[in-house]
Amino acid sequence: MSDVAPEILAEIADWPDRLEASCLGTKFDEGLVRVLASCDSTQDVARMIGIGAAVTTGRQTAGRGRLGRVWIDDEGAGIALSLAVPMQDPATISLASGIAVLEAIRAMVPPSIGPTIGLKFPNDVVEATSGAKIAGILVEASEGVAVIGIGINLHRRSWPPGIHARSVEELASKSTLRRIDLLESLPPRLSRALDLSPSEVAHRFSKAHAPTGCRVEVESGDHRITGRLESLSPLQHLEVIDSDDVRCRMPVESTRIVSWDPSSR
């Protein structure tokens, strides 16, 4: 722990007690809570512990994102939390996790700002007016266990070149946010979201989907299509009306939103 700043060690001192308390009555076991001063990836630790684990850290140095991307919080400015649940449909787990994270972030900002924060299929929480990424979810499933990784930009920081991101602190317009306040809200919110039916999960995700109605570029297999995203059924398909006014329906399993223009709504 010698490479962890003293202020981070002081900050996380009360995290174990508070995170354990937040797991009571949820799908997560207060006895399997782990708070690490520093680690490469909370995902790896949660996977080793198994179902019921809730793992966080004061400083993550090699977090993983979707499609092999890297999620690094080496400044202690964000939240890295991994939670392990029994394997179900990974797509539904990912969508439900996005709903829970969105609700938790909206609760941290003024009511007038909450509606400007939305979801982007399949796994991002974004600022709807700019497209900037606020949080991401990664679900890794194997051997009957699904590990849900949640990364949230909480405090202001300098972003690496090419990264379009915002912090919750910037949206909240205050500098008194504590990471534990957001962290401890996640296990109960996630537990409730995972109890929703797949149809309710899809409905809530679609309702909060920021790119719907905007100009998008989507990739489906070997094809890229540019047009207006007409609708999203996040467990089935998305529909884009292309430049020739042709409605294109693409399965979500093989389709991703490459880019979108929030100003085109």
Image (tube, helix red, strand yellow):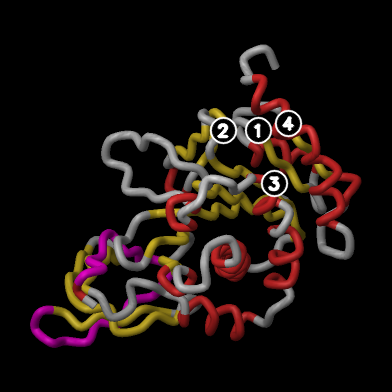
Gap in angstroms between the C-alphas marked 4 and 3: 13 Å
Q: Nearer the viewer, mark 4 or mark 1?
A: 1
Q: Are marks 2 and 1 in contact (CB under 8 Å)?
A: yes
Q: Which residue is identified by label 1?
A: 58
Disc 4 marks which amino acid? Answer: Leu
Q: Is residue 247 magenta?
A: yes
Residue at image position (86%, 43%) is 17
Residue 36's disc number: 4
Q: Which residue is identified by label 2?
A: 76
Q: Is residue 248 magenta?
A: yes
Q: Residue furthest left?
A: 244
Q: Is residue 38 above or below residue 28?
A: above
Q: Are marks 4 and 1 in contact (CB under 8 Å)?
A: yes
Label 4 vs 1, first from the N-terminus: 4
Label 2 vs 1, first from the N-terminus: 1
Q: Which residue is identified by label 3?
A: 180
In terms of depth relative to the viewer, which is nearer, 217 or 100? 100
Specify the segment rendered in magenta.
Answer: 243-263
Q: Quadrant of residue 34?
A: top right
Report helix, strand or loop for mark 2. loop
In terms of depth relative to the viewer, which is nearer, 170 or 200? 170
